[in-house]
Amino acid sequence: MRRGARPRPDRRRVGNMQLRAGAYEIGKRGAIRFDWRDPYHVAVGLTWPRFLALFVAIDLAVNAGFAALYWAVPGCLENARPGSFADAFFFSMETLATVGYGRMAPLTTYGHLVSATEIVSGTMFTALATGLAFVRFSRPRANILYAERAVVTRHNGRPTLMVRIANGRTSLLVDGLARFYALVAERSAEGQFYRRIQELPLVRARIPIFGLTWTLMHVLDEASPLAGYDQARLQAEDVRLFLAVTVRDPTLAAEVHDMHDYGAQDVVFGMRYADAVTVDPTGRTVADLERVGEIEPE
């Protein structure tokens, strides 16, 4: 490439793209929406309706291609109507699925070669489709409940930012790890405006057993990136909070990752979370998951 020459645009790139971090949307330009050089990532990342639509489209296209090969050479299929593309297509579907109802069959060497190729292709296609479907079904998913709003209240005499989460599964989760971040606006010494992600240290970032609820606390002292912030300043600077949680699900023997975000309007001052864990008459500890996000004046 000549010095100073612009790179040629990639035709696979799109002009606009939306990414999500929790409920927070991020716009992207010039990104590849579907990078077909990595078909595995594309297939696993599609929604179920799109994945099924892609599967049906590929299946029909492959069957139509082999049907055209049968149809192009009349007489290669026994009991097929002369010039009938429909017969060739349905024979192709039966062959690709290795079903074979017995009425139509290859008659010539050409027909046998095409059908043999289709059987091998059908076996590979079925294996790939089964593997992708299994991967999509087996992906561990978090069932963590988040309070609708974060609160700033006094805890041990100090202002503290809190977020309460709960385990929505009927089984225990273990080895919980939480990370809290704030996306804040800053200005460099040269006067350049930019946004920066600051980590908010938690009072307790790890929990060995996550069975009921977990209240994550960040002390708003002089060392906090949010020191001196009030409701008005949070909204004026459009501060956004991100909570990343990693836990291990013993049932699946796999780590589960989840993320949630809070906008400035989702942070309330002078409020605290209402009790969501009680003890019933039998002495059993019970968590009311419907009260995870319930708040009250401090």
Image (cartoon, rainbow, N blue to C red):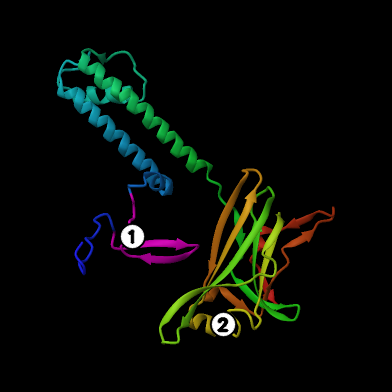
The residue indicated by pointer 1 is: 31
Query: Can you give x and y, in whole percent of width and height, for residue 90 in the image?
Result: 27, 24
In this rendering, would 239 be left or right of 211? left
The residue indicated by pointer 2 is: 231
Say which quadrant the C terminus sits in: bottom right
Say which quadrant the N terminus sits in: bottom left
Farthest right residue in view: 282
In this rendering, would 160 be left or right of 100? right
User: Which region of the structure is painted magenta?
Assistant: 14-35
Q: Secondary structure at mark 2?
A: helix
The residue at the point 61 percent across, 59 percent down is 145
Category of crowding for the residue at label 1, using alpha-carbon neighbours closer than 10 angstroms: few (below 14), some (14–19), many (at least 20): some
> Nearer the viewer's eye, disc 1 or disc 2?
1
The residue at the point 67 percent across, 48 percent down is 170
Query: Can you give x and y, in whole percent of width and height, for residue 11 in the image?
Result: 24, 56
Query: Can you give x and y, in whole percent of width and height, for residue 89 in the image?
Result: 25, 26
- Give whichever of 88, 38 is nearer the camera: 38
Residue 212 in view in this figure: no
Q: Is residue 34 magenta?
A: yes
Label 2 amino acid?
Gln
Query: Can you give x and y, in whole percent of width and height, for residue 69 in the image?
Result: 20, 25
Label 1 amino acid?
Ala
In the rendered structure, which disc, 1 or 2, sits on the residue that comes first in sequence?
1
Q: CA distance from mark 1 to mark 2?
A: 36 Å
